Image: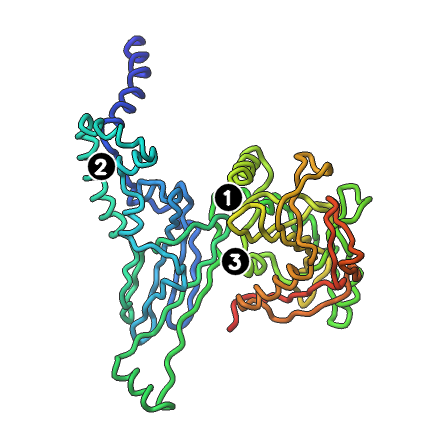
Amino acid sequence: MRLEQAWEQLWGPLRARLWRLLITQYAPDEGYAAYRDRAVTQEEPRARITVAVPSAAESRRLFGVDIAKRGIQPVWLRIENRSPGSLRLQTVTLDPKYFTPLEAAGVNHFSIAKRLSAFGAMSWLFYPLLLLVPMKLLTAWWANGRMDKVFHRHGFRLRPIASGETVEGFVFTTVDLGTKVVHVRLTPLEPLRQSIGRLLHPGSGDNAPPVDLVFTMPVPGIAADYLDRDFAAIRPPASVEPCTPDGLVPRLEAMPAATTNARGTKTGDPANLVVVGTFDTLLGAFAARWDESETISLATCWKTVKAFLLGSSYRYSPVSALHLFGRVQDIALQRTRHSINERIHLRLWLTPLSFEGQPVWVGQVSRDIGVRFTTKAWNLTTHRIDPDVDESRDYVIEDLVAAGRVKAAGYVGGVGPCTPDAPRRNLTGDPFFTDGKRAVILLAASRSS
């Protein structure tokens, strides 16, 4: 008996591997729905909308292939039309780069030829081997046909949603990790005759406005740096200092003017930004256009090294630690270009201040424009910042205004002015110049026009 068990333990995994070599296996779990436990629902008089975003592992289980590896992220929607007329989902508002269900399936099709093409000019040497695996080719063809049906069956049908009708399905979007902003817009439909009549006779009736709801959805998959922050301990209720409109400016100007090293003995980049808003409002305002930063670990360091060596982008790269109030940043966000060496860094620290019941955050923002050698970092390299730090500060205001997330904005005194001819330097020796002010942004809880 023991011999049979030992044989099975040895032969079982080998048999499974041999079987996978001979055939193409495709086993989606179409009934899987645990991701809906994180679903969020919003409603208004004309519609009720529920949104859920599966993680990469959940998507792989549901659709049977690693679609996240192909840059695809399914967003599940359930829409109930409560209006008297038909509504239509504007998919380009949700993601202008969305994939149709069959397009998403096609990207994930099993293809031996596609794998062989990775060998370039040498691939023709392997094509005779295809004659030895007819079952592999046949089952791949069958699996791809089934995959098309699975993706099409679960895709959200882009058609008018009739009054009183409830529809659900997946829209296949590009990948976002950490937090994903899902902007759902439903456009009321009307007969063509009515639309033309309003065009020919202005003032005969206004077109019904669209249903616009924005969801800020958590997506498992990265260890965002703020996840280990206990904001209740950083800012206990007894320490909160409410500020009046007249008292806010002097309190902000009294905040630390610049970041420091861990010991607080040297100053660095200017603390040139103030943001007023709850943590959820802050994430919702930035998440659609900025990426979160992962914590520093062996895995994230390896990703960073690969991106550096290959000159590629790493959207969630860890951000180096700067200090304010005796601690490292509470939240780090970034906007990257095609290279990891070119990005905008934004760091925020929670303060004891409160304005109109909203917490106040002090921040530092700068733009990386390259890499240089330094003896002040353990890896002998550091990002070189754009010395015009006011540009990146003002960029944040412009970006949030464009996103419709600013109630009010202005400037208060900060680190004090310095010129290009007599710049200050940060902790790694990079020069910077500034008008000395810090921007103050009062966030809107939801998008405004």
**Residue matched to label 3:** 289
Residue at label 2?
Answer: 140
Secondary structure of the residue carrying numbered label 1: loop
Tag 1: amino acid: Ser
Mark 1 Cα within 10 Å, few/some/many (few <14, many 20+)? some
* x, y percent for residue 408: 64, 71
Say which label, 3 or 1, has the lower sequence index: 3
Left or right: residue 91 compared with residue 257 = left
Mark 3, secondary structure of its residue: loop
Would you identify the image quadrant in which residue 83 lies? bottom left
Q: Amino acid at mark 2?
A: Ala
Task: Say which residue label 1 marks.
Answer: 312
Residue drawn at the location 66% of the way across and 47% of the way down: 384
Instruction: Pick whichever of labels 2 and 3 is earlier in the sequence.
Output: 2
Task: Determine the CA span between mark 3 and mark 1.
Answer: 19 Å
Residue for point 22% across, 39% down: 143
